[in-house]
């Protein structure tokens, strides 16, 4: 339980738009270990989205060091970043981001497709991941035929299927009603109990309350990092 | 991700956007169909011209009289207006010593007259010539026999009719053995020629062939009975045409006492020079039509690029998601290239099919022949796929360069 999945050391991120420089993160140092369930909170503009992009290898820091499962992300090129996202990170988005023309099963298969897993194995893993989120009977449905909560479950299955080091959820309940929200949060709880590392970005404290550790950001810096008693 | 998976993903995207893909394909399809049809038209025209020229006779050289100069005024008439060629010239050309590469010689003299069979009359050209005419002009007989040397020796009143002439005068009945009256002289029809079609200047199937001596003595009012209008020569083979040309020119120069070729009172045309002129013309036609078709292909290609760019913009979110899930820029680029080339291929196949269909159906409505060459069809297909790829490169590059966060953020 003590292997670090994420190690950030003095990480800063500066965006440049025209002549204006915007500093989204200033000197963030953070370590998240395997098996942790962490919520990152903060008002809009606090830098939590930027942090999420960096943790998900969608963007690279301007300064500092970032090790993801011991691998230095700072020196990676585009291909290597894509590979790191593929193997290390499972994304769950607020908008679900499922491809509407593909069935649930095919959507879940996508990360395996880019990992080069043969077709038969992909089918098998996707079926297993869908069963894991309780949607084994919806494998052949397209996203349009599923409820919001079910769509987000498919997205969670897609995040799980490649067995990543980290599940990164960006406002996963932002588009769901309270029943579906509880449903998805229960699913994250379950994954956490099964030993998964889950990082959840949210601005809702009732969502953050499910996590074991809450990190609060303000103006691009960590202002609070509290371990909750289980 | 291997190529098979990339192709599968690309096909999936094409299927998903059916209407858009269909419209894009239509642009390429029309372009390719135009290429296949216009090249087919050009080649059809070219082969028609070639077969018409070949119908004139194999290894043929045509000797025509030169221009005449009216005494006193010095006005020069057109080529062929002089009657400088004679029967003696023709028999001199038959010499195996002076002209070994000339296989046969057929002097001809042409007039026009009315042919009568009872109440039926028909005006046509009367060709006076010798027995070798059929060989030199590469004509065969549908029935009966051709003129013999004996017919010329006796100035016999016999004639061989062209197929059109025979059917105009005798209908479906066999003309051979019947009698036809020309200039109040009854001629016996001894043979009917097989059809040779028509060329631009004359109908080869509508003529009456009579012995030269008969024409001169009994049909023509011309004063110089010795002169002929054209001498047809057959070279011994296709490869000896130019040798035969040289021999004929040298022999006639000597006989007409011509020292400067520019002053020659005759001209010799070779079949192959006609052929090369005609094929140059039809090649120009093919290039012109092909050029127009190529333009329409270019328009189709720009259509592909346009649609692919729209597709990239519209699918920004999808591209971002695929990248977030681990698709490398190379994989994204390939996916879009595959999509573009699938559009090209489908358009190419459809266009080739439409072109071939057009080549089968169109000749029923227009008089021109359309020849579909397999190489043109294969070439058009290759071009169609190439267009898809070439015009897909830029949109695919744009898709591959999209940053995943920007792509995911767009709504």
Image: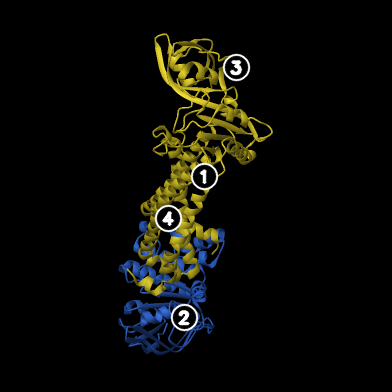
C-alpha gap between disc 1 and disc 2: 106 Å
C-alpha gap between disc 2 and disc 4: 43 Å
C-alpha gap between disc 1 and disc 4: 70 Å
Q: Residue at x 42, y 49 (%)?
A: B288
Q: Please tell me whether residue B341 is drawn above or below residue A229 in the rendered image.
A: above
State which mark lies toward you, 2 or 3.
Answer: 3
Depth check: give the residue in front, B69 or B216: B69
Q: Which residue is drawn at 57% across and 27% down?
A: B106
C-alpha gap between disc 3 and disc 1: 37 Å
> How many neighbours does mark 2 have within 10 angstroms: few (below 14), some (14-19), or many (20 or more)?
many
Residue behind mark 1:
B262
Chain ID for label 3? B
Instruction: Residue lying at the far top in this picture: please name it.
Output: B118
State which mark lies toward you, 3 or 1.
Answer: 1
Kindly indicate whether the residues beneath marks 2 and 4 are on one polypeptide chain. no
- The image's mark for residue B14 is 4
Colour of the chain lettered A? blue
Percent coordinates x, y for residue B48 in the rendering:
49, 36
Residue B138 seen by the camera: no
């Amino acid at each position: 339980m003590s292997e670090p999945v994420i190690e950030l050391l003095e990480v800063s991120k500066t965006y440049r738009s025209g002549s204006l420089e915007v500093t989204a993160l200033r000197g963030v140092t953070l370590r998240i270990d395997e098996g942790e369930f962490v919520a990152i909170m903060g008002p809009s503009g606090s830098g939590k989205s930027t942090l999420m992009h960096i943790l998900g290898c969608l963007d690279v820091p301007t300064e500092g060091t970032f090790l993801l499962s011991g691998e230095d992300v700072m020196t990676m090129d585009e291909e290597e970043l894509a590979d790191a996202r593929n193997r290390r990170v499972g994304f769950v988005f607020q908008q679900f981001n499922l491809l509407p023309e593909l069935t649930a099963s095919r959507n879940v298969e996508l990360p395996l497709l880019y990992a080069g897993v043969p077709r038969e194995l992909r089918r098998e893993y996707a079926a297993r991941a869908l069963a894991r989120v309780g949607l084994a009977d919806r494998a052949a449905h397209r996203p349009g035929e599923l409820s919001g909560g079910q769509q987000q479950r498919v997205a969670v299955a897609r995040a799980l299927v490649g067995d990543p080091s980290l599940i990164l959820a960006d406002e996963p309940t932002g588009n769901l009603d309270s029943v579906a929200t509880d449903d998805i949060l229960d699913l994250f709880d379950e994954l956490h109990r099964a030993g998964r590392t889950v990082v959840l970005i949210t601005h809702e404290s009732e969502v953050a309350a499910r996590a074991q550790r809450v990190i609060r950001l303000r103006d691009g810096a960590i202002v609070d990092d509290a371990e909750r008693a289980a | 991700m291997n190529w098979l998976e990339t192709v599968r993903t690309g096909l999936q995207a094409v299927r998903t956007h059916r209407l858009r893909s269909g419209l894009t394909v239509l642009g390429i399809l029309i372009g390719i169909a135009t290429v296949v049809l216009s090249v087919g038209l050009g080649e059809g025209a070219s082969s028609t011209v070639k077969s018409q020229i070949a119908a004139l006779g194999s290894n043929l050289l045509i000797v025509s009289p030169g221009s005449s100069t009216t005494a006193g005024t010095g006005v020069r008439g057109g080529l062929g207006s002089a009657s400088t060629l004679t029967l003696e010239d023709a028999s001199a050309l038959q010499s195996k010593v002076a002209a070994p590469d000339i296989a046969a010689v057929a002097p001809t003299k042409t007039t026009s007259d009315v042919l009568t069979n009872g109440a039926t009359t028909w005006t046509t050209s009367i060709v006076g010539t010798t027995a070798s005419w059929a060989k030199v002009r590469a004509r065969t007989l549908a029935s009966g026999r051709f003129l013999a040397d004996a017919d010329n020796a006796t100035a016999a009143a016999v004639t061989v009719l062209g197929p059109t002439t025979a059917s105009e005068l005798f209908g479906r009945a066999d003309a051979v053995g019947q009698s036809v009256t020309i200039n109040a002289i009854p001629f016996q029809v001894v043979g009917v020629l097989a059809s040779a079609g028509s060329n631009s200047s004359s109908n080869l199937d509508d003529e009456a062939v009579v012995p030269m001596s008969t024409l001169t003595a009994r049909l023509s009012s011309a004063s110089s009975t010795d002169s002929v209008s054209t001498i047809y020569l057959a070279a011994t083979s296709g490869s000896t045409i130019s040798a035969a040309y040289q021999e004929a020119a040298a022999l006639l120069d000597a006989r007409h006492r011509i020292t400067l070729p520019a002053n020659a009172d005759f001209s010799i045309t070779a079949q192959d020079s006609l052929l090369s002129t005609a094929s140059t013309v039809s090649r120009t036609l093919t290039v012109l039509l092909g050029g127009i078709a190529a333009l329409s292909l270019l328009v189709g290609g720009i259509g592909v690029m346009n649609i692919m760019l729209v597709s990239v913009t519209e699918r920004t979110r999808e591209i971002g998601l695929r990248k977030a899930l681990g698709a490398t820029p190379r994989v994204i680029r390939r996916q879009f290239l595959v999509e573009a080339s699938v559009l090209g291929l489908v358009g190419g196949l459809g266009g080739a099919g439409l072109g071939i269909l057009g080549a089968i159906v169109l000749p029923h409505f227009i008089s021109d022949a359309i020849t579909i060459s397999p190489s043109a069809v294969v070439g058009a297909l290759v071009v169609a796929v190439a267009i898809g790829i070439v015009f897909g490169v830029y949109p695919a590059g744009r898709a591959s360069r999209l940053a995943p966060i920007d792509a995911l953020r767009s709504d």
